[in-house]
Image: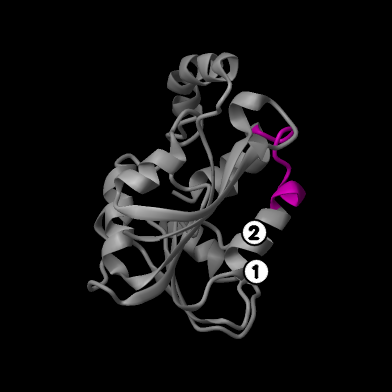
Amino acid sequence: MGFYSDIILPRLCDLAMRNRQLVPYRERVVGGAEGRVLEIGAGSGRNLPFYGPSAKQILALEPSPKLVEMARSVRHQQIPVTFIEASAETIPLDDRTVDTVVTTWSLCTIPQAATALGEARRVLRPGRLLFVEHGLAPDEGVRWWQDRLTPAWKSISGGCHLNRPIQAMIEDAGFRVERIQTGYMPGPKPMTFMYEGSATPG
């Protein structure tokens, strides 16, 4: 889950999505987290420095032991962080036990993303899902490329899908999208259409 945003994203999409271009997204999305926070696909901890004082505890969910080990060394604000080595499809938390779920460039790689979103909804008490993801573009020509590139792209990018309809996926999982901004980042359009926003359990 964190593989794309932490390994593939800065390398294969170097021209399209340099890490410095992602900072404003991280500031807005991660900085808005409140209370007890579950981050899905925490990866190597790139988001940790962006949590603000409204976040009281961070549960960093990441299935890769190697990435968890990297995340443990990341400097961040003095907010308690608990690392959970587990899949987003089976989140080892009780129902309605977190205030905010954060996902940044993770839904593209989760094999059963719909299941993961259902799990996110289950653990909110209720609260807010804060997200920034890349996915299916509105332009027919770009979608054509996304659909044709995705099979090969998945094989070299940790399972990343270029063509997932992020807003529809979130809504189909039982969330009500309360705010969303979409648009292209600079770079190859099949890889750079962004969805940023927040949603609450419906």
Q: Quadrant of residue 127?
A: bottom left
| Residue pictured at 36% horizontal, 75% vertical | 98
Q: Which residue is mark 1?
A: 50
Using the image, determine if residue 7 lies above or below residue 90. above
| Residue pictured at 65% horizontal, 74% vertical | 75
Figure quadrant of the C terminus: bottom left
Q: Is residue 74 visible?
A: no
| Residue 17 belongs to magenta span | yes
Q: What x and y, as percent, mark residue 119?
A: 28, 58
Q: Which residues are magenta?
A: 13-22
Residue at disc 1, secondary structure = helix
Residue flagged by tag 1: what amino acid is it?
Phe
Q: Which residue is mark 2?
A: 26
Q: Is residue 43 visible?
A: yes
Q: What x and y, as percent, mark residue 163?
A: 47, 28
| Residue pictured at 43% horizontal, 45% vertical | 107
Prevailing secondary structure of the magenta residues? loop
> Depth check: 76 or 70 in front?
76
Q: Are marks 2 and 1 in contact (CB under 8 Å)?
A: yes
Q: What x and y, as percent, mark residue 13?
A: 66, 33
Alpha-carbon span between mark 2 and mark 1: 7 Å
Lateral position of residue 9 relative to residue 83, left or right: right
